[in-house]
Image (spheres, coloured by chain):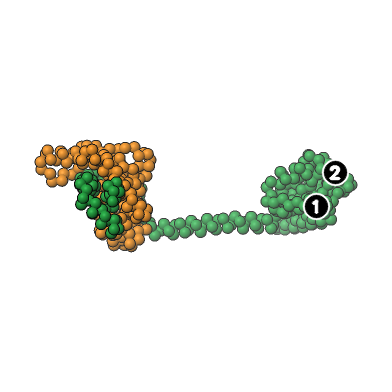
Chain colours: A green, B orange
């Protein structure tokens, strides 16, 4: 065994980490080599030197300071809250879940009950009709390009490019505008070439045929009529009560 | 594991871990933790901070302590904090001050012998502070604290083989630093 290798293995030798054969070879070499023996003595001295370092005196302020910091953070005094904390966390989680569920449910139910809103698309670039539906939903006449931007609040824009869109004649446009005026009190029009009618129901957007559009318009009118009848009835009842 | 009372025995022996018990726990552990922190950081204030922070973390995690937790767990907290500090200051060499009153006397009555011993100790301290953190902490835990390889591996979160190689390299490095003065 060479001295260089012995020097490298001295630490392992001291700790008894060498296998038996190497351990034996080291012992044979060390018995004959004075310089390696000196090196061994030096290596053996290192752990002792480190171990002989004095224990630094512990500052007395450690425990008082720790307690002060713990008291400041209040955790030491709030230990009685520990069982309650879990309940608090569970309660907050449940409330949050209920709140989120409520919002989602409300959105879903709104989507179902959403009143029809009509968007009429034209091929010019001007929004020409702006009015309000009976439930204050906007009714706009838009150009094709404006459809997407105006529908930004809708969840999804479903378009059917392959679907043949119904071209309205000028006469039909005029009558549609008249119907809109009747239904929604539209006051402004500035188009002569409405190409198709888009019906929006909640988040659902679809292009509809003229017949469906007319059906819907009738439904709206019926709804309005019924509403007026009911209103009239309520007014009458109210009047009767007042008269009594 | 370390042949001392398990932390779980101290902390979970009573259902309510109250302030008085915690003070006793701190009293029985502060010396060892301070010694480790001081030897690792070489700075009184930082070592004090490290011990305080360790106690606070123990308190905050007292309900998470497992029944088989040993002292390795609390040493691990202290060592991690010290290593974080070392990383933050990017291992700026912080050599301990050579003030005699920083150390407890080792029963040495002869002033001259005491002074020679203290000088040697300061040299050894300086040599330790020159080691890189992995070697330094391994040498401290093994040669000062007397932890087993397995405990050191738990504390440092490394394999036992790495502990051994770091220890031997650390000692070799110390030998080279101290060779001119020994």
- Name the spot of residue A221 as percent of width and height, x first: 80, 54
> Image point 56% across, 55% down: which residue?
A100
* Earlier sequence position, callout 1 versus callout 2: 1
Q: Is residue A225 above or below residue B82?
A: below
User: Camera-side residue: A40 or A234?
Assistant: A40
Residue located at (31% from left, 42% from top): B131
**Quarter holding residue B62:** bottom left
Element at label 2: loop
Quadrant containing the C terminus of chain B is: top left
* Few, some or many residues within 10 Å of mark 2 (<14, 14–19, 20+): some
Report whether A122 appears left or right of B159: right
Disc on res. A61: none
Near-viewer residue (A40 or B12)? A40
Disc 1: which residue: A162
Q: Residue at x 16, y 39 (%)?
A: B116
Q: Which residue is mark 2?
A: A193
Could you say which is closer to the camera, residue B39 or residue A178? B39
Dots 1, 2 in contact, CB < 8 A = no
Disc 1 vs disc 2: which is toward the camera? 1
What is the quadrant of residue B17 in the picture? bottom left
Drawn side of residue B70 relative to residue A214, left or right: left
Foreground pick, B141 / A135: B141
Residue B36 appears in the rendering: no
Give the x, y percent position of residue B41.
30, 42
Percent x, y of residue A223:
77, 56
Badges 1 and 2, same chain: yes
Q: Horizontal and vertical percent for residue A216? A: 79, 55
Is the residue marked by circle 1 packed among few (<14), some (14-19), or many (20+) residues within 10 Å?
few
Question: Residue under mark 1: which chain is it in?
Answer: A
Q: Quadrant of the N terminus of chain B?
A: bottom left
- Residue drawn 32% across and 52% down? B164
């Amino acid at each position: 065994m060479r001295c260089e290798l012995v020097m490298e293995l001295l630490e392992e030798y001291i700790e008894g980490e060498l296998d038996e054969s190497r351990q034996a070879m080291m012992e044979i070499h060390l018995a004959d080599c004075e310089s390696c023996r000196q090196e061994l003595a030096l290596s053996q001295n290192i752990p002792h030197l480190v171990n002989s370092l004095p224990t630094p005196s512990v500052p007395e302020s450690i425990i008082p300071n720790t307690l002060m910091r713990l008291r400041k953070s209040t955790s030491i005094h709030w230990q009685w809250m520990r069982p309650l904390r879990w309940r608090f966390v569970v309660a907050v989680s449940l409330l949050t879940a209920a709140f989120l569920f409520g919002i989602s449910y409300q959105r879903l139910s709104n989507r179902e009950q959403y009143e029809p809103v009509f968007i009429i698309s034209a091929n010019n670039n001007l929004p020409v009709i702006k009015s309000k539906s009976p439930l204050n939903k906007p009714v706009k006449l838009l150009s094709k390009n404006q459809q997407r931007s105006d529908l930004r609040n809708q969840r999804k824009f479903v378009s059917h490019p392959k679907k043949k869109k119904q071209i309205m004649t000028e006469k039909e446009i005029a009558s549609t505008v008249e119907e809109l005026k009747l239904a929604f009190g539209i006051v402004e029009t500035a188009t002569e070439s409405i190409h198709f009618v888009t019906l929006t129901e909640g988040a659902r957007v679809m292009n509809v045929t003229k017949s469906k559009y007319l059906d819907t318009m009738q439904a709206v009118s019926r709804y309005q009529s019924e509403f007026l009848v009911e209103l009239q009835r309520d007014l009458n009842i109210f009047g009767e009560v007042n008269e009594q | 594991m370390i042949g001392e009372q398990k932390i779980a025995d101290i902390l979970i022996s009573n259902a309510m871990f109250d302030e008085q018990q915690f003070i006793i726990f701190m009293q029985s552990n502060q010396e060892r933790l301070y010694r480790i922190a001081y030897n690792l950081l070489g700075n009184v204030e930082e070592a004090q901070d490290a011990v305080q922070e360790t106690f606070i973390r123990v308190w905050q995690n007292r309900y998470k302590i497992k029944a088989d937790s040993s002292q390795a767990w609390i040493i691990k907290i202290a060592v991690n904090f010290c290593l974080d500090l070392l990383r933050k200051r990017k291992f700026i060499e912080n050599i301990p001050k050579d003030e005699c009153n920083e150390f407890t006397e080792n029963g040495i009555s002869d002033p001259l012998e005491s002074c020679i011993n203290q000088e040697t100790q300061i040299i050894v301290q300086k040599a330790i502070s020159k080691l890189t953190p992995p070697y330094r902490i391994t040498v401290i835990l093994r040669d000062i604290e007397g932890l087993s390889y397995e405990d050191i591996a738990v504390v440092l979160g490394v394999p036992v083989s790495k502990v051994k190689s770091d220890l031997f390299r650390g000692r070799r490095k110390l030998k080279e630093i101290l060779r001119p003065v020994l």
